[in-house]
Image: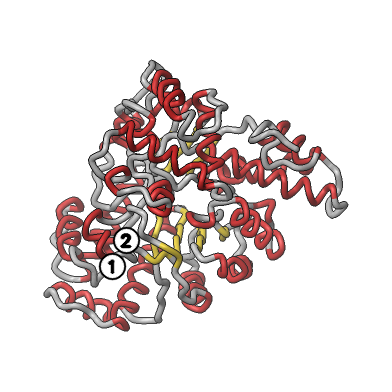
Amino acid sequence: MKKFMDETFLLSTDTAMSLYNTFAKDLPIIDYHCHLSPKEIYENKTFQNITEAWLYGDHYKWRAMRANGIDEAFITGDATDYDKFLAWSKTIKMTIGNPLYNWTHLELQRYFNVHDILNEETAPGIWEEVNRKLTSEGFGARDLMKMSKVEVVCTTDDPIDTLEYHAKIKDESDFDVKVLPSFRPDKGLEINLDGYLQWVQKLGEVSEVQISNYDDFLNALQTRVEYFHLNGCCVSDHGLNMLMYEETTKKEAETIFAKAFTGEKVSPDEEKKYKSYTLSFLGKQYAKLGWVMQFHMQALRNANTKMYKQLGPDTGFDSINDGQIAEPLSQLLDGLEREDALPKTILYSLNPKDNYVIGSLIGSFQGEVPGKIQFGTAWWFNDQKDGMLEQMKALANLGLFSRFIGMLTDSRSFLSYTRHEYFRRLVCELIGGWVENGEVPNDMNMLGSIVQGICYQNAKEYFDF
């Protein structure tokens, strides 16, 4: 029997352990998609206690606590931070089999050298020990990033953002982590959502474009793309909860925008055409500047209306969508390819049923650079042992696993970089298993190069960091 989460955690063979310890363990981290706050990075935010660092805004933990019957007061309510921590300590033992169990203990071990099992009995002592370290010098947001060997992070930023903190961080001579923006124009695509016109107005203000028609709108978007580019941006991100595409003309898109501009709701077919043209327009801008385009697909958001009204979005009431993506995704990529305007693209689906759809589709649009179209790492609900392995095996079965650009945190927490370790261990476990089974040769130089590529080097080259 192996010890709980010792140095062999997730590694079942000698080959896997050798690959991890020799080639993966000490690599820097490129976190090319996260939700960290640039302001908190600039200010080197410090944390008053582990609850603030762990439980504020962590909808993964919130969902688990609700499933365990914890009252909302101890989750997002007005209970004390200590009582919220105790509520989490009651829940953690119930999460075995969930990645939260391993992530929690990895974070305790790696950042605080705490190897006790968190539960109701150990919680008071862990609270004291972790808080003593967390509130000491050297545990601010920047310090945690340096401790994790972070080299680059790409935050997630609205086109109307000023990017002032990215600029301030860039001017800091004593902080060598690159903190780059990502262009996330979802609010400009969701033409039927409340607040769309207000967002368009703000877009006009920050871009200094008087928006009165669709041409103005596209001009304003292009202006912001160029502004982001000047501020170091090299990647966009799109949350496409339901992927839709239909060939349309600019004239049709202009008419649809004009209708929405008067405050009318547009029909589902009109929404599809508007999104198709606008998204294609943006794809062409990204290709022109050499950016990477990301699609995060198949999220069913805010399923619980009552709690959405009470707490707002991103509070733990989202789930997996089951729409069909093969045809619209193929048409969208093909439309850009026909105009020689398909940028490097990363495709993620929240629904694992799409693994082989994406894994096969990316092979239809490769060329020019290694791994131009990427099957993005297992995301959100798939960000666990089985989900990661299934995504990697699908990619390996259908394409070039060795060109995979690897892991990201998709997190709002400065303690989440242990997820890169979790991923790297699984990469080595998968490849090590192939070696042990005689499926690939025991050539450690070749395999070590592949491991380092997937865990670090491929992303560095893909984004040209």
44, above or below 256, in the image: above
Q: Residue at x 31, y 58 (%)?
A: 185
211, above or below 234, in the image: below
Q: Residue at x 38, y 48 (%)?
A: 62
- The answer to whether residue 353 of the structure is visible from this angle is yes
The location of residue 453, given as percent across then percent down, is 65, 43
Q: Amino acid at mark 2?
A: Asp
Q: Amino acid at mark 1?
A: Glu
State left or right for residue 368 relative to residue 172. Answer: right
The location of residue 354, given as percent across then percent down, is 56, 69
Which residue, given by chain and number where applicable, does mark 1 sit on? 190
User: Callout 2: few (<14), some (14-19), or many (20+) C-alpha neighbours within 10 Å?
Assistant: some
Disc 1 secondary structure class: loop
Is the C-beta separation of discs 2 and 1 under 8 Å?
yes
The location of residue 402, given as percent across then percent down, is 69, 51
Residue projecting furthest to the front: 121
Nearest to the observer: residue 104 or residue 67: 67
Q: Quadrant of residue 184?
A: bottom left
105, above or below 287, in the image: above
223, above or below 304, in the image: above
State left or right for residue 107 relative to residue 427. Answer: left
The location of residue 267, given as percent across then percent down, is 26, 82
Mark 2–mark 1 Cα distance, whole angstroms, equals 6 Å
User: Callout 1: few (<14), some (14-19), or many (20+) C-alpha neighbours within 10 Å?
Assistant: some
Q: Residue at x 41, y 57 (%)?
A: 286
Please identify the quadrant where the N terminus is shown.
top right
Q: Quadrant of residue 109?
A: top right
State left or right for residue 298 relative to residue 357. Answer: left
Which residue, given by chain and number where applicable, does mark 2 sit on? 186
Disc 2 secondary structure class: helix
Q: Residue at x 54, y 50 (%)?
A: 98
Nearest to the observer: residue 390 or residue 103: 103
